[in-house]
């Protein structure tokens, strides 16, 4: 069946696209120029077929999810990125700053619930140091020793580690001793320095982001990677962003998944740009799956794009739907996501995956199977 589909597609694709499609079918790596040609010239159906070919090579008919919840300790942030709807300065009536007891109350909500992961990220609070966050990790670890703690974006880590005067390796090692298991992918945005100066000039740059993830990988901690798309970036800048991630993955193999994050326009200073249509979301998922040949998983973060688009993404190379979340994140709801109270049951996730023609697999943070349906 695979060879028949390959021959059929190659018969109907001409010019440069024919060679690129053949390379994808044969498992050969695309160059940035190949990726740009594919992005600009391939129709969406071809993108989907090629991405699905790569997805099935990586994970067969499996689509993954986990049972997780989020903790967002604060939305008070030292930085004020133009695209951010989450940031609030100290003293703002819409700001929050959870106490340790409030954080532990969130953890206790899941007593007796078979969650496997807690995801912790929030604003870069100017008054919090690495030991404060370390004590938080230790308290969570004591309360739930059975779950994996994925915590702190590279932007948060950069601030707290620099504040302590430590190297990236020293800071991450210290947090690991407190209970840190892995690192989420937030804060990458777009690596292009000129664009970064326009949209998030204050926060850690691309080199810092990549260095922190590399240090974590070298210590044996896995992480995810993200890209914020659909605002002022060009296709070339998206591809350059993914190339830098691909290069780091070649060196370390430490990324679990790549997560395209869609720009949402509500309540931020880039709202005049609008939002890209769902066809662009799917083209971006497909390109990510095809180009990032050394990433095992592409995640469709459903609180960002909505359940319907997340299901559609499974036909464009995505093989992970994140998790149950249980209404514990506000980052995208504050930016105008259709999922204003993001929560899915395992039953709903399983039904979504099956209805898209795939096999549901519950996973842990490192993608080991917990249960298959």
Image (cartoon, rainbow, N blue to C red):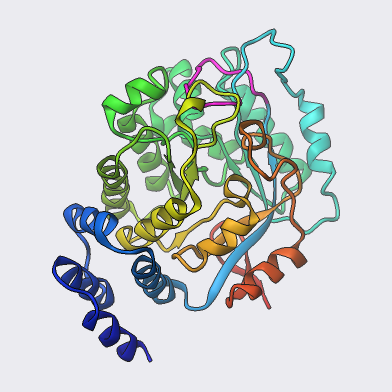
193 or 136: nearer the eye?
193
Q: Where does the magenta region start and end? A: 74-86
Which quadrant of the figure contains the C terminus?
bottom right
* Number of numbered discs overlaid on the protein picture: 0
Q: Name which quarter of the figure residue 191 lies in.
A: top left
Q: Name which quarter of the figure residue 212 lies in.
A: top left
Magenta span main SS: loop
Residue 142 position in % (x across, y down): 75, 41
367 or 361: nearer the eye?
361
Residue 248's place in the image compared with 187, above or below, is below
Residue 84 lies in the magenta-colored region: yes
66 or 368: nearer the eye?
66
Residue 11 position in % (x across, y down): 22, 83
Residue 55 position in % (x across, y down): 42, 70
User: Which residue, as the protein is rendered here, is positioned at the far left?
Assistant: 15
Residue under the point 54% across and 36% down: 264
365 or 55: nearer the eye?
55
Residue under the point 50% across and 22% down: 160
């Amino acid at each position: 069946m695979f060879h028949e589909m390959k021959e059929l597609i190659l018969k109907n694709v001409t010019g440069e696209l024919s060679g690129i499609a053949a390379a994808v079918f044969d498992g050969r790596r695309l160059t940035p120029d190949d990726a740009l040609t594919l992005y600009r010239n391939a129709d969406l159906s071809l993108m989907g077929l090629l991405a699905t070919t790569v997805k099935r090579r990586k994970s067969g008919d499996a689509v993954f999810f986990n049972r997780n919840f989020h903790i967002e300790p604060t939305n008070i942030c030292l930085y004020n990125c133009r695209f951010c709807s989450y940031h609030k300065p100290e003293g703002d009536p819409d700001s929050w700053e959870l106490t340790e007891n409030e954080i532990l109350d969130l953890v206790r909500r899941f007593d007796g619930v078979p969650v496997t992961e807690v995801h912790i990220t929030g604003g870069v609070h100017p008054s919090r140091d690495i030991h404060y966050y370390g004590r938080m990790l230790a308290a969570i670890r004591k309360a739930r020793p059975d779950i994996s703690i994925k915590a702190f974006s590279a932007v948060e880590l950069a601030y707290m580690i620099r504040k302590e005067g430590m190297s990236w390796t020293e800071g991450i090692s210290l947090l690991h001793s407190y209970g840190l298991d892995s690192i989420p992918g937030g804060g990458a945005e777009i690596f292009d320095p000129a664009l970064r100066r326009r949209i998030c000039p204050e926060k850690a740059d691309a080199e810092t982001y990549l260095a922190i993830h590399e240090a974590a990988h070298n210590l044996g901690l896995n992480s995810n990677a993200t890209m914020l798309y659909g605002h002022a970036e060009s296709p070339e800048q998206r591809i350059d962003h993914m190339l830098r991630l691909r290069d780091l993955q070649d060196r370390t193999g430490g990324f679990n998944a790549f997560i395209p994050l869609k720009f949402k326009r509500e309540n931020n200073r880039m709202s005049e740009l609008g939002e890209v249509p769902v066809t662009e979301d799917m083209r971006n998922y497909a390109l990510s799956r095809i180009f990032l040949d050394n990433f095992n998983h592409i995640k469709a973060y459903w609180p960002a794009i909505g359940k319907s688009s997340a299901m559609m993404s499974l036909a464009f190379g995505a093989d992970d739907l994140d998790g149950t979340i249980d209404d514990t994140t506000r980052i995208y709801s504050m930016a105008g996501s259709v999922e204003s109270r993001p929560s899915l049951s395992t039953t709903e996730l399983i039904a979504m995956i099956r209805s898209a023609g795939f096999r549901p697999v519950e996973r842990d943070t490192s993608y080991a199977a917990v249960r298959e349906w």
